[in-house]
Image (spheres, coloured by chain):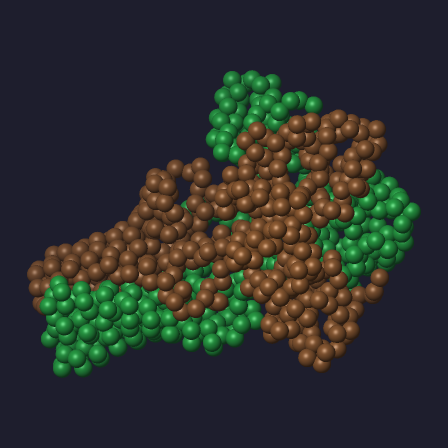
Chain colours: A brown, B green
């Protein structure tokens, strides 16, 4: 065992990764492969993957071949899609077979999903029968469901064997199966009956029967459960892995917590993008790597929709043309009012949408919350209105304009808060994604009602 | 072992939780405690906690006392703060001692942080010496650091013992220590030397020395590492637990992945709130439980700041008073232009802020990205402008107005996309939180420059 040659303490870690990346390139350019190999010995797989991905394309395969077989398989799974694809096209057949057969089935499915069909057929043909079976199994499920993201490789034992026999079975299987935190317990028909942690196994009496020490109240999911639901189950019940069964409760695979963390982050990013009015990213798609055509395609739909809905304000304002001609000053305050309404509406919709997304509002009645937001909008509006009325009076000396803008502000903030709270609930109930649908409708309603209220109040107060 | 009496399959789970909550209340109101106890037998601790929290306050302690000692400790840790506090005030001294001493140290620190000082002193006095030591240890660290969220209860062995001796030690410790996925290996001075999974232990030869089979390239963090950094380490390296050491690399505790999932979600919520211009939530604070005073306090600061920055638009527009008096129609399009700028700016800042937050942009140069956003803003603006010019011409017959609005739109989208991308990078570099600072400044810049460009183009095209 080599001594730890690099210090991975926090605080120096990200600088350290930069140093390794640069050093690797230097060694490879100098064709000093021994030094490159030594450099990578203590480096974690995910960091090696990042280093290789940063290399010029021609050097990636050279660097990859420096790794031993076990490491190569580990590192490969951490590479980004683009690098995985370009490497696999460069591999010799024997190398490709090795990698492809030793990937965990869920990772392999993700990779094959992205490769050109001809290459996929060639690779699948080189899978061992067992791996080909796993492949077909996972592909049989829809994307973003438990069945697609699970791994069919897990350790299970029958319920009527002893602890010692179970340990023997684990010893036999453990080299093939990458990670095992729980042992799953089934009956003779592979129906899931219980779970057992490795710790429980170690501390149990060797002659105990498994069924006596297993946990029977199992949390599990079906193969067609949505991946976000799977993630939430793991989060709620503090699990390390979740067993996945078919409709007959036969155990088919497990989803592990590390996949779930990535799923939760991707789902959060998707929600954040939607709230910013950007089309949902396709899986694993990186906005910053897209070309202009794709970026424009992602952003223009909502911008056009928002443009159309906002153009109603043009017609509305033209209806109040005489009012504007009489008191042009009123026009000066339109951006301010529109912005205030937008800000309050954004605050309200943000909390509601996020609450719906994290299940915080799962059991809550919408109506009291909407009423609460309405009142809050009023309170916020009153505070803002006082500021505005005082400022307008002091700086412009026009109290009536001030009162017009002030009262309109209160009306707008009430409308904005109420709409911002109500519409996400409504869309959620109708089965639409609140994160996606809310923004255009909230801004439209707030703008239209706001302008209408503003000029109506103006006509009243200014006697037009 | 009782048979599984309830079906926890997905799809019926959340309905099932509702059913259990209602049923529990019915049994308790009828004082049918045997039935209530039986109802809860197969229910997971986190779900029991939710059920108890939903009960009227007077019944909570009754329900809690239905649980056996082990369950009670489990369920207590899942209760929300408010319920934890009210229960602990109702407990008899003996009950409180039991709960408090058996909580995991990191959970206990969170609880004690929130209780009235007098109660805290009384409870701490009832801690066993060992637990009191743990308590003092964790409290010695700043909130939101690894030291505060770690648990000092983990299994460790010396590197020079055999596998059999290690298994014996684990058997002795395992009842006290809740979860063990990794075993940590230290030297005689408790310096962290390596890690070992339970699986590795089971499959190893009984006479092997630990140091021969342990993993030496350990990922770890220091006690003063920020909790978000801890979470990212666990996420990046697919760990189940992260060892925490002091400055001399002595092992002090571990942070487990289930805590990390909750941290990541809370951090995402915090970012989302900030992007919606709401003050960051205090830890564990639930927006929906706050009273009107606190909610207003949370939302008014940014609204006032935004109001002030937006009021610059009032003065700017008043400078163009003659233009507006001449062509009042120009006023009709101000909301539309402001909104379009806001939407494009929101899109750009959303992707940049999220990219900075997930470390996607950690190593990227800002300048190329900003230029790319600038060009994207132009492309989007051209598409929108074509729509607008055509629409205005068809519906109003005024080509010159159309061209004014159209060209302004292009200018505004370019300004918005560039500002939306540049400001988050700038704030990040200056050490400010981009999620928090960006919105007011982006809207201000876009509005001010946008109005200036709009009316300047109008003067040009319309010859005013």
Q: Position of residue B304 (x, y in %)?
A: 35, 63
Residue A101 location in percent, x, y?
A: 67, 52
Residue at 80% from the left image edge and 42% from the top image edge: A171
Q: Quick one: quadrant of the N terminus of chain A?
A: bottom right
* Residue B181 in view, yes or no: yes
Q: How many marks?
A: 0
Does residue B392 sit above or below A364 in this rendering? Answer: below
One can see residue A425 in this view: no
Q: Position of residue B77 (x, y in %)?
A: 62, 40
Furthest-right residue in view?
B207
- For image coordinates 20% across by 58% down, the residue present is A312
Q: Residue, x 59% and y 38% (percent of image)?
A: A244
Quarter of the view holding residue A361 = top left
Q: Is residue A244 left or right of residue A328?
A: right
Q: Position of residue B273 (x, y in %)?
A: 44, 56
Left or right: B315 in relation to A205: left
- Is A72 above or below relative to A160? below
Q: Residue shown at 55%/36% (left/top)?
A: A222
Which image quadrant for residue B237?
Answer: bottom right
């Amino acid at each position: 065992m080599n001594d730890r040659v690099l210090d991975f303490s926090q605080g120096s870690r990200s600088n350290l990764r930069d140093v390794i990346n640069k050093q690797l390139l230097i060694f490879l350019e100098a064709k000093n492969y021994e030094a490159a190999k030594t450099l990578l010995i203590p480096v974690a797989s995910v960091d090696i993957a990042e280093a290789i991905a940063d290399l010029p394309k021609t050097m990636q395969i050279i660097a990859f071949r420096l790794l031993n077989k076990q490491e190569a398989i580990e590192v490969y799974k951490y590479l980004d899609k683009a690098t995985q694809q370009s490497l696999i096209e460069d591999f010799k057949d024997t190398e490709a077979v090795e990698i492809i057969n030793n990937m965990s089935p869920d990772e392999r499915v993700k990779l094959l999903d992205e490769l050109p069909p001809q290459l996929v057929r060639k690779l699948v043909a080189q899978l061992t029968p067992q791996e080909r079976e796993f492949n077909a199994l996972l592909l049989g499920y829809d994307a973003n469901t438990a069945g697609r993201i699970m791994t069919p490789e897990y350790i299970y034992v029958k319920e009527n064997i002893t602890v010692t026999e179970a340990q023997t079975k684990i010893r036999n299987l453990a080299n093939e199966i990458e990670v095992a935190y729980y042992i799953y317990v089934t009956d003779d028909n592979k129906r899931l009956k219980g779970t057992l942690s490795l710790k429980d196994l170690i501390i149990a009496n060797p002659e105990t029967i498994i069924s006596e020490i297993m946990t029977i109240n199992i949390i599990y999911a079906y193969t067609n459960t949505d991946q976000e639901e799977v993630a939430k189950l793991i989060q709620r019940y503090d699990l390390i892995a979740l067993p996945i069964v078919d409709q007959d409760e036969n155990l088919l695979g497990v989803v592990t917590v590390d996949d779930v963390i990535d799923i939760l982050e991707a789902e959060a990013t998707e929600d954040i993008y939607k709230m910013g009015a950007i089309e949902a990213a396709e899986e694993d798609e990186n906005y910053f790597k897209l070309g202009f055509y794709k970026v424009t395609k992602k952003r223009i739909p909502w911008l056009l929709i928002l443009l159309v809905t906002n153009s109603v304000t043009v017609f509305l304002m033209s209806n109040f043309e005489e009012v504007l001609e009489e008191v042009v000053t009123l026009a000066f305050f339109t951006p301010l009012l529109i912005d205030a309404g937008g800000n309050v509406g954004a605050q309200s919709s943000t909390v509601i949408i996020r609450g719906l997304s994290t299940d915080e509002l799962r059991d809550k009645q919408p109506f009291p919350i909407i009423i609460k937001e309405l009142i809050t909008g009023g309170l916020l509006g009153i505070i803002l209105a006082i500021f505005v009325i005082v400022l307008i009076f002091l700086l412009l000396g026009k109290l009536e304009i001030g009162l017009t803008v002030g009262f309109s502000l209160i009306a707008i903030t009430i409308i904005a808060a109420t709409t911002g709270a109500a519409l996400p609930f409504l869309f959620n109930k109708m089965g639409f994604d609140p994160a996606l649908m809310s923004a255009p409708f909230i801004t439209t309603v707030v703008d239209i009602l706001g302008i209408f209220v503003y000029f109506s109040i103006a006509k009243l107060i200014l006697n037009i």
